[in-house]
């Protein structure tokens, strides 16, 4: 079992745009400035998406691109890792989404496309928890940072990440989990764990400043250190520029790349860059439109494929 993969699923957006519903608890989103048309934002997002795919493929990283459908309109379809995850044992899991207008992103044809190329042994659906009297949510690898080797899930609690579903995921997949509270500069819950924490093969980029409870913070630090992870702390200000939203992937030749946005790369200190570069290759990609209006960065755009090849 490997922590990293060289196979990535990405969704090419048809109608990317600012989503007012998700902005209710995503402090990373910015509403469009007066005079900037939605169509312009959508077109720029497609350009950034295509450029990102080209960069990944030029570094011999396998990218499976699926076209978003024009109807129904899905402004956040570019972020598939929130509704689907795949696993080494051939399992596909789909997840309940907090925002009702994101639930239409789940597409059976995408799962069929994966099944055509990879071995799928199990399929689990958590989305029925959306329909409960008291709905529960767990938004895939936005909510969960998974250590596949040591079978540990890290998660910060939020309206989109419920501890009860985290427990059910842990039982289903045979994993332990560590859940904690994390707040941004304004005291608001951090909406997804993957904007404050990234887990590589032998390192963890994490915003420890966001965890105010010292017991929880020390538990996170000790767990990471005991599993052989070098901790690269980032500040709240760096997190606000998506320095926690990174993903380490492999090339087809086994080269390790830490994919991050240009804004994340630029806000890192020289020391942080050097520490990371001693373990992996930094791969910054410019996606300013997607970050500004979508409130997510490069990690959110990549759903890892861990399924066995046919």
Image: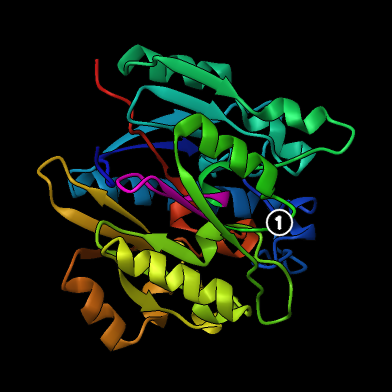
149 in magenta: yes
Residue displayed at 18% across by 67% down: 279
Q: Nearer the viewer, residue 93 or 44?
A: 93
Left or right of 202 on screen, residue 166: right
The one of 138 and 186 positioned closer to us in this rendering:
138
Q: Residue furthest left?
A: 253
Q: Position of residue 285 (x, y in %)?
A: 35, 61
Q: Is residue 258 left or right of residue 245?
A: left
If the image is split into quadrants, where does the N terminus sit?
top left
Q: Is residue 177 above or below residue 122?
A: below
Write down the quadrant of residue 257 in the picture.
Answer: bottom left
Q: Nearer the viewer, residue 301 or 136?
A: 136
- Classify the position of the C terminus by image quarter: top left
Please tell me whether residue 145 belongs to the stretch shown in magenta.
yes
Crowd band around label 1 with a 10 angstrom C-alpha radius: few (<14), some (14–19), many (20+): few
Looking at the rendered structure, the secondary structure element under dot 1 is: loop
Rendered location of residue 28, percent (x, y): 64, 67
**Quarter residue 126 falls in:** top right
Q: Is residue 13 visible?
A: no
Please tell me which residue is depicted at 63% across the width and 78% down the height of the picture. Answer: 213
Residue under label 1, please give it.
37
As drawn, 114 above or below 17: above
Determine which quarter of the picture holds residue 294: bottom right
The spot of residue 295 in percent (x, y) is 61, 60
Residue 261, given in percent of the width and then of the height, sits at 41, 65
Please say if 8 is above or below 285: above
State the residue at coordinates (71%, 42%): 137
> From this viewpoint, is residue 40 visible?
yes
Magenta span: 143-154
Q: How is the image coloured?
A: rainbow
Q: Is residue 298 left or right of residue 252?
A: right
């Amino acid at each position: 079992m490997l922590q990293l993969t060289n196979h990535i699923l990405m969704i090419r957006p048809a109608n990317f745009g600012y989503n007012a519903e998700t902005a209710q608890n995503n402090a990373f989103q910015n509403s469009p400035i007066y005079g900037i048309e939605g169509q312009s934002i959508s077109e720029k997002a497609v350009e950034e998406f295509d450029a990102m795919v080209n960069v990944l493929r030029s570094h011999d990283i396998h990218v499976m691109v699926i076209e978003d459908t024009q109807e129904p309109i899905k402004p956040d379809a570019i972020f598939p890792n929130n509704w689907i995850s795949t696993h080494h044992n051939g399992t596909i899991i789909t997840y309940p989404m907090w925002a009702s207008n994101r639930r239409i992103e789940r597409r059976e044809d995408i799962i069929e496309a994966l099944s055509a190329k990879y071995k799928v042994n199990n399929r689990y659906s958590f989305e029925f928890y959306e329909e409960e009297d008291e709905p529960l949510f767990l938004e895939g690898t936005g909510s969960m940072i998974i250590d596949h080797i040591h079978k540990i899930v890290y998660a910060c609690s939020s309206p989109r990440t419920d501890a009860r579903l985290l427990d059910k995921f842990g039982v289903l997949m045979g994993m332990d989990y560590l859940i904690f509270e994390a707040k941004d500069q304004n005291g608001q819950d951090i909406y997804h764990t993957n904007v404050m924490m990234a887990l590589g093969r032998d390192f963890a980029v994490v915003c420890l400043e966001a965890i105010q409870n010292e017991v929880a913070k020390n538990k996170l630090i000790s767990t990471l250190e005991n599993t052989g992870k070098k901790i690269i702390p980032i500040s709240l200000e760096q997190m606000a520029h998506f320095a926690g939203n990174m993903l380490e992937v492999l090339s087809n030749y086994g080269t390790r790349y830490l994919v991050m946005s240009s804004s994340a790369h630029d806000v890192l200190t020289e020391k942080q860059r050097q520490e990371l570069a001693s373990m992996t290759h930094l791969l910054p990609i410019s996606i300013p439109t997607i970050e500004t209006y979508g409130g997510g960065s490069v990690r959110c755009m990549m759903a890892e494929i861990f399924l066995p090849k046919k």
